Image (cartoon, rainbow, N blue to C red):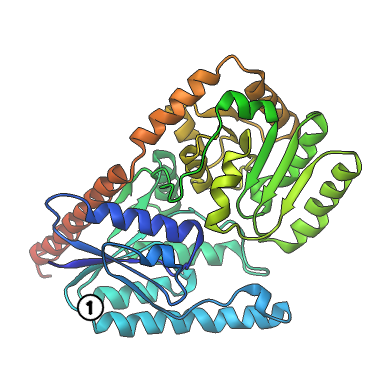
Amino acid sequence: MKKILMYTPSSDGGMAQYAWELVTALNAQPHREYSYEMVSSQDLHQQFLDASYPVHAVLPPLRHRSEFMNKATWVGSRLTHYPRRERFFLRWLAQQENIAGVHFQEWTPWMAAGMFRKIRKMGIKVYYTVHNVVPHHYPPLLPKSVMHGWIRRGAMQCDGLFVHTDRLADEFSNFLGEPHPPIQVIPHGVWTVRNPTDVPTLEERLKWKKLLFFGSIRRNKGLDLLLNAAEKLPGYSISIAGEPQERQYYETEVLPQIARLKAAGVNVDLRARFTPDAEVGPLFASHSAIVLPYTKGFVAQSGVIFMALAYELPVVASEAGGMKDLFRDYKVGVTFKESSPEEIASAITSLHAGGHRHDIISEIRAAKRCLSWNESARATITGYNRAGERREANACAVETTPAL
């Protein structure tokens, strides 16, 4: 049986979890045409190595930013790491047998097009999941037009592309322009809870008025807006669990607001670091709601929502990115259109005021039933088949073109 490799260099966090969930579901499908294996870094966490299928933890590991003395050495390490990693993978791939395709969950934008061409020359198809239509943030001094050019060239070298919502499919199609490779919508599944945690009833949790902001701290996640909204939310506490990704934003806007709120007597629990999996369950189970005050600059689907659904935690969120599509189908909390402190405070107050709590739990459980990884796997296989049909159609078109 031929194989499709899921390429995911991240050793932990949401991307590694996503790949593990999807490959597990793909291998569980009946009447499979392919077997599915995972390729990741040498320091892949043990929980993702424990799988019923081969996991190749072979890629050079990425050193954490905290290991470097200054920003210059950190940047230098990145500039050498990615080319080294891609060269290693190409050499490794050339030694494998029966590989039908490589499905990239992550890529290096400025190297993607060249790398994908080399893989396709081996007779191997290339797929890519577009988790973000455009980057969350851009390297300093790099024009957006340059980055967008890299993304377009890389995507156009793919046999098939995947996104998580219809809205993101339309946005990426417009971004690429016609013609482009087929874009398949695959639903994001609700995360698997590995270590079951006792979750109090929603009625009890809402009485706590404990709000959670979870995930990477970047400007387009709108944490500063939530902190401003706290002034309009007496009696509420806020927990922030995430690693700062934009240092200037964090130090000049987030930290001063936290200091001001604490001075005013607001309970703010800051955990400015990556959250290990063992801490995620208790963290989600001990809060009333998760708040996603994402701004218009956020053009993606949020994996945090699917973690909240796993622990039946209501969501207060903007309609940025692909989140609007999810809330259109499942009313798992309260949304707001304008990312402003006033709108955020109003939405939080509305959730805690009650009157629709039973409906929210029912909607959360309906989402958990429908947004399964089996559905994601079936849609992914459909995308593989569509890509194969496109490759054959293109080949026929070339063969039947009359000579001039």
Q: According to the image, label 1 marks what residue?
A: 122
Q: Nearer the viewer, residue 154 or 346?
A: 346
Q: Is residue 213 visible?
A: yes
Q: Is residue 322 visible?
A: no
Expressed as whole percent of the image width and height from the top left, the position of residue 146 reads 54, 67
Residue 358 appears left or right of 47: right
Q: Nearer the viewer, residue 147 or 315?
A: 315
Residue 59 vertical position relative to residue 342 in the rendered view, above or below: below
Q: Quadrant of the C terminus?
A: bottom left
**What residue sits 78% from the left and 35% below the top?**
230
Residue 322 appears left or right of 78: left
Q: Nearer the viewer, residue 92 or 289?
A: 289
Expressed as whole percent of the image width and height from the top left, the position of residue 163 reads 39, 49
- Residue that extends furthest to the right in the rendered view of this protein: 263
Expressed as whole percent of the image width and height from the top left, the position of residue 188 reads 40, 45
Q: Quadrant of the N terminus?
A: bottom left
Expressed as whole percent of the image width and height from the top left, the position of residue 266 reads 83, 39
- For label 1, count other residues whose C-alpha is less than 10 Å away and answer few (under 14), some (14-19) or many (20+): few
